[in-house]
Every structure is written in C-alpha cells, then in structure tokens.
Amino acid sequence: MNANATAKSVFHALMALFCLFIAAGPALGAHSMLDAVQKRGVLRVGFSSFVPWAMQDKNGDYIGFEVDVAKRLAKDLDVDVELVPTRFSGIIPALLADKFDIIIGSMSVTPERNLKGNFSIPYDYATIEAMANREKTRDMAFPGDYNKPGVIIAVRSGGTPAIVAKKLFPQATIRPFDDEAAAVQDVISGRSHMMLSSAPLPAFESRKQPNVLYQPTTEPLARQPVGFVIRKGDYDSMNVLDNWIRLVEEEGWLKDRKDYWFKGTDWENKVQ
C-alpha cells in the first residue's frame, strides 16, 4: 500500500471515530457545548479581524483562514455557523458570558488566557513580525534603536504582539488599538514608528505601500501555538475538537487553506 493510500485509510478511520463522537451528542454531558450546539443547530463562533485570518471582502462578508476553519468545523458537525465579530480585548469575557460557543480567532496560548478558558491542541502557529514607517525610522537600527524612550510601537490591544512588544522593547511606548486597521494607519501617518502584528500583515501592508512602509527585519520576533478556546470544564467537547483538528491535518486540508491565505496573494483583490 502506498503512502497516499495509507494516509487515506487513516483519515477514513479517524473520520469514522469522529462521527461516533458526534452521533453521541446527548451522551456528551449536561454542560457540553457541542450538545447545545447540535440541539440549536448553529455553532456560534467568536472572532476578531486579523489579516488574513478573518477580514471583510468588498461585499462586507467575512473571509479568511479562520473563516474557512469555522465553516468547515460547522459543516462536519452538521450545523450552521454564525460568525460573531468581537473586539479582541474583550473576546474571552464574551465567551464566558455565553455570547458565542467557541473562539476561533487567531488566539495564541498564554498562561493568563489558559486560566480563563481551555485551549484545544494547536491548529496553527502565529509568528509575530514588525512593520515600520520608512521616513520616521530612516536613521534607526533594528532592534537597538527601537528600545528607547520616545519610540512608539503600535499593537492590537489584548493581542500577543502587545506582550511581545513589552518584552522586547520595554523602554518604548506601546500604543494599543482596538482595531488593527487603525494601528496600521498610525504607522502610515508617522505617529507610530513601528507596528508588531501577526504575519503576514506586516509583509502584506509593506507590499501595498513600499514608499511608506517596510520591514526592519523579516525574522519572526516570536512564534506561538494557536488553538480553539471554549469554556472550562467541557472535556468531552474539547476531545471532539482535538480529534477534528487531527483529522483535517491528516487530510491535508489545514495545510491547503494555510498555504492559500498565508503564502498566496490571490485573495488580496477581494478585500476592502
């Protein structure tokens, strides 16, 4: 049996196991998120806009890597999906308040977040990169000259880039924004020297405006695992989610979607 045939056999076996989990809906427990989702017929997904994880196209519809992930998960659960855009700084409190069932929102694992919610196994890894205003930083050497008083670094409020910025540039002023687009504009205008964000946004914006923006380094400043987040205590639902991630990884679907959104540029003309 060749490698492809073996992979297909493994995938079909795992999918059969997954279907058994789903078919056992009522047995998942009184506090099972997935049990409630199946009864409701809708998976409510909390997320926040990050390019190209989730963003609005020219028609106002949400597209992106995590939108694909959310839709595929709902399809395999045989339910509809409801996308619930939420400010990243308040997304965990919104989950705990039952505003939605699950966070699929480029959320990397940190001890502080893990104390509030339970993370699945990683379905992706986020790398943090830098983007700077070309004119404002023309005489600055990276990274030393960026770790000084008077330097302003824009970040998304509540996100991992803010944590990385405070760790790597403790002498600089960290300027938080609720919206990533506003942080980008702050760098473009020259009010901030630099922005830290999840890849590939810095490279994407630098390609769009090469006369204004550039990457002082293309080396990742940090790399962290990204997982689904659900409320604590729901181990049966987490077991299903972990196995679903393993299934779509084995199938090659996750890599295909990641390559499309992070390595290709076909989607760029679809966004606002």
Image (cartoon, helix red, strand yellow):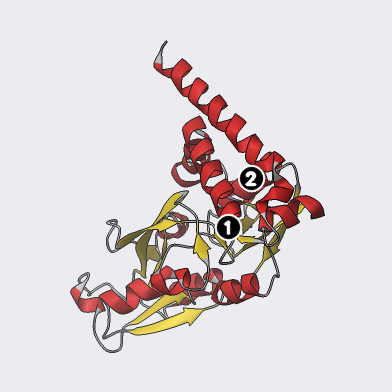
Q: Nearer the viewer, residue 86 or 23?
A: 23
Residue matched to label 2: 73
Q: Judging from the image, what secondary structure is the residue with disc 2 in?
A: helix
Percent x, y of residue 137: 29, 74
Mark 2 and mark 1 residues within 8 Å of each other at the beta carbon: yes
Q: Judging from the image, what secondary structure is the residue with disc 1 in?
A: loop
Percent x, y of residue 210: 40, 59
- Left or right of 192 in this view: 63: right
Q: Nearer the viewer, residue 41 or 107?
A: 41
- Left or right of 52 in this view: 199: left
Is 117 drawn above or below residue 82 in the view shown? below
Q: Earlier in the sequence, mark 2 or mark 1?
A: 2
Residue in the image at 20% along x and 71% along y: 141
Residue in the image at 59% along x and 60% along y: 234
| Image quarter in which the N terminus is found | top left
| Image quarter in which the C terminus is found | bottom right
Residue in the image at 44% along x and 62% along y: 108
Where residue 143 sits, quadrant-wise, is: bottom left
State the mark number for residue 104: 1
Q: Is residue 60 visible?
A: no
Which amino acid, by three-letter code, is at mark 2? Leu
